[in-house]
Image: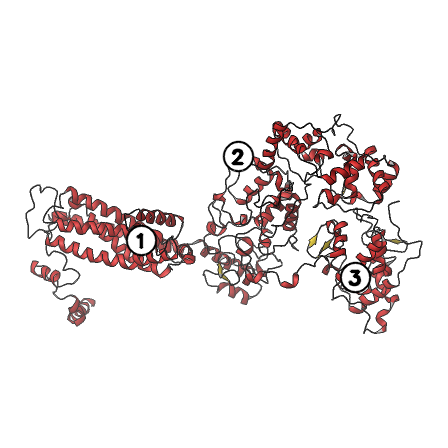
Amino acid sequence: MKTDSLKLRRVLAITSVIFLFALAISPAKNYFREYRSIQEHFRKLGTSRARSLKEAQAYQNHPVAINQIWMRDFDNRVDRCTTCHQGVSDATMAKAPEPHRQHPSTAHTPSDIERMGCTSCHNGEGLATVRADAHGTTADSASPLTPLVNIEAGCGRCHTTDVVPQAALLSRGRALITKAGCYACHSVRGHEQFRSEAPPLNSIAVKTGGEWVRQWLKDPRAMDPNSTMPNFQLEPQQIEELANYLFSRPVKLELAAAIAAASAEAPGDAVNGKKVFSESRCISCHTVEGKGNGSAPELSKVASMASRGWLLAFIRDPHAFSPETRMPRYHFSDSESRDLVAYFESEFKDFGAPEGILNPLHVNQTLAEKGAKAFRSLGCFSCHDPGQGTIKEKFGPDLNGLGDKRAASLDFGRRIDLNRTLAAWTTAKLSDPRSFSAGLKMPTYGFKGDDTRAIVTALLSLGSQPVPEAFHPSPGGTPTPIPGGAIGKLVQQYRCLSCHQIGTQGGDISTAPLTFEGSKVKRDWLVNYLMVSFTIRPILEERMPIFRIPRDEAEKLADAMTSFYVNPAIPEDPFAGRPASDQNAAEGQRLFVSNGCRACHIVGASGGYYGPPLTDASSRLKPGWTFKWLKGPQAWRADVRCPNYGFTDTDALRLTAYLETLRATSAQKPSGGKK
Amino acid sequence: MNTPSLDSLGLWLRGTSVYRSIVRHGSTETNRNRSLIVFENLFLHVHPVKVREKTLRFKHTYWLGGITIVCLVVLVATGVPLMFYYHPSVPQAYQDMKELKYVVDNGIFLRNLHRWGAHLMVFGAFLHMLRVFYHGAYQPPRQFNWVVGVFLLVLTLFLSYTGYLLPWDQLAFWGVSVGTNMAREAPVIGDKLRFFLLGGNAVSENALLRFYVLHCVVLPVVLFMFLGVHIWRIRKDGGVKGPSEDAPDVFHEDEP
């Protein structure tokens, strides 16, 4: 029995020692945590890079500890990223190896680091002090780090406008999303009112032929490279059903009448039509064999796409056919539009097209009924609103909060080749949406390379959290309103916003925003320009079309511009209250030459083609605008290439005075139309 | 040189009143003295004065009850520090779990000790009951202690279940959803019972608070009361019943 007791004691002794060692494991692991060695390394690196003994000592005395940033504006979140990334705002650590490197300078760094922390832009788990958790490298991480190639997604979390200065990729992505019409099927906060530009298909039976519709449905881009309609990869059977359905739809009565009347008209003169076509600068939006802006359909085969009557009726009143189109309504005379269509029919034909491509289709009711179902189940109605009332629910999934989805919650389906990350999933969804599984409905847009990256960036910016209150845009930034009434109708008719921007609205074809047009140009010049517009910057390919605006309309528009679209910061008379020497035009001319303005601007007979010619500057520009522009051109448009010379008020005024003396002789006056 | 001075130091130490109030009966290794030590000590007096070596052998009881009690001690020892770092509130609870990993020294060790200790306690309690059952130790005179043991098992399970909600993750949420829905199926009082457990009709912050209070205060207190009775009854009933005693139990005063 004594031996038993001894044995028990021995067991107790041995297990106690083992237990003691086991207990020591945890404190040891605690002591050897990753961040401690990183901070140790940072200390050594800092000491070796220090420029003075005092600096070196500061690095030496830096305590080993968990560092954190308290983000009061972000729901009192805490970011501990700086525990390892100790050099983020340390100039000594420029170009140091990660994780010690200094953060590159951006709009918010280093000024806002203490306020915005790290995860507000980069995502990631701010609380974590373990690398894998902080960077969210596992598929079920709640907040993985945004890949650096998409880092501008972080900007978009707070900056919800379409254009974000200094975030070119994000802005491009958002523009592409709008252009591709993603908002028609997917709901995204702030874009609930989006309407697709796609034609409403209310006159298709009298517009085109059955064969053309078949070919279009098979692959729209093959028929028109500028088409925004994606490829739905339809089966031949589906194509037949849809075509029958489209031709079975009733044609809107007024449209049918207009088309019938137009097709009965006598043919026009193609030679004059060609002149009208180039004078009107259709290719500022359209293309002909790829030449032109490309934001509107390719025209080189247009006569094989639509019947003569339809073309004629459409050119006369595009807005009756398609209320959302960006095409302006021109003031063509009846014979001019006839000539235009005659020109189309003589040259813009698909000579390789099958015989009878425009022959109407004889509707088979059974197929048409099946087609009606397909029209619904494929979601065609999202873009081609059949006019059966507004769409209550979006066809595709809600995209809000996409940027905060866990990779583990995504359906990768057949794509076992992909990395299990949100960015990889979104990229694959964009470039090949049908590859995930059978029966998916999203069509193929064929986005490529940088476009995909831009769109992914814009999509990742759709966070699930609302923008923190402290970062809401200030009420001062409200968009400039578009006037209603008669002026509003004119702006609508000529679709000014298809090309120009006013405030935050409008297209991107023109480089001249109209937001402060009234402070910029003189009224009389504007009236003449609206009636017969000409090239302002010779280097640009896109020219303002000549709408043939009658004088009274031009005057109304110019008056509206001069009264609505002004900036109170731009003085009417910049010379008021300044000494007379500031009006020294000769000195201004010297400055003009010595600063090399001629490299871009034409004055008289010579000069560069990049900027607008200044030969007639005084009849176009208001001196107040010229003065403010010279003080800082980028204040008006961020991408302006005109350098900011940092002129003093006196120098800027002298230059303005010089430009005020520039007036064209009648021979130098630019004239409308391409010769 | 040193030896005499050490001896005198020892002598002085044994003379102090602090030493004498801790070691009251000296270190004489006689049975009488040992009995005195056990009798007169609050912490030791629940133990029998004398234990047969046979009952301490591993094969006899597998120490299953003892293991369960040691688990309980570990759980209390780790649970109290965990309470320092935990807020029973919806926005904080899950973050606090993560904080244990990210900033609390040895936090993950604490939490894992508590978690695995809890698993082992449930497991140990079950095996302990099986052992008791197969040894027929639920028969008189131990039938009362068997019932106390059943209560202890139920309390252990409740503790384990209430602790399961506290991390406030998906497992916890659905675990408690399913559990309280089962409670609702109870006849007559089902709906009321569920409402009472959750402090509402859904698993929400009220449920979290209730489960927290149950887990940290109510259930442990009740458990300790039952445990006291349990151990006291073991002594009263004549200690552990061994496997070989097929005949109806005979009261052995000297057996633990």
Q: Give the chain of mark 1.
A: B
Residue B251 x/y as whole percent: 6, 50
Residue A346 x/y as whole percent: 83, 33
Quadrant placement of the N terminus of chain B? bottom left
Residue A457 shows up from this direction:
yes
Seen in the image, is A224 located left or right of residue A674? left
Relative to residue A179, is residue A31 depicted above or below?
A: below
Q: Give the chain of mark 2.
A: A
Q: Amino acid at mark 2?
A: Ser
Q: Nearer the viewer, residue A426 or A208?
A: A208
Seen in the image, is B229 located left or right of residue A84? left
Q: Give the chain of mark 3.
A: A
Residue A149 shows up from this direction:
no
Q: Please say if the residues under marks 2 and 1 sit with CB atoms less than 8 Å apart.
A: no
Q: Which residue is mark 2?
A: A437
Residue A520 x/y as whole percent: 79, 61
Q: Amino acid at mark 1?
A: Lys
Disc 1, SS: helix
* Label ID, residue B75: none
Q: Closer to the observer: label 3 or label 1?
A: 1
- Please name the residue shown 62% across and 63% down the image: A474
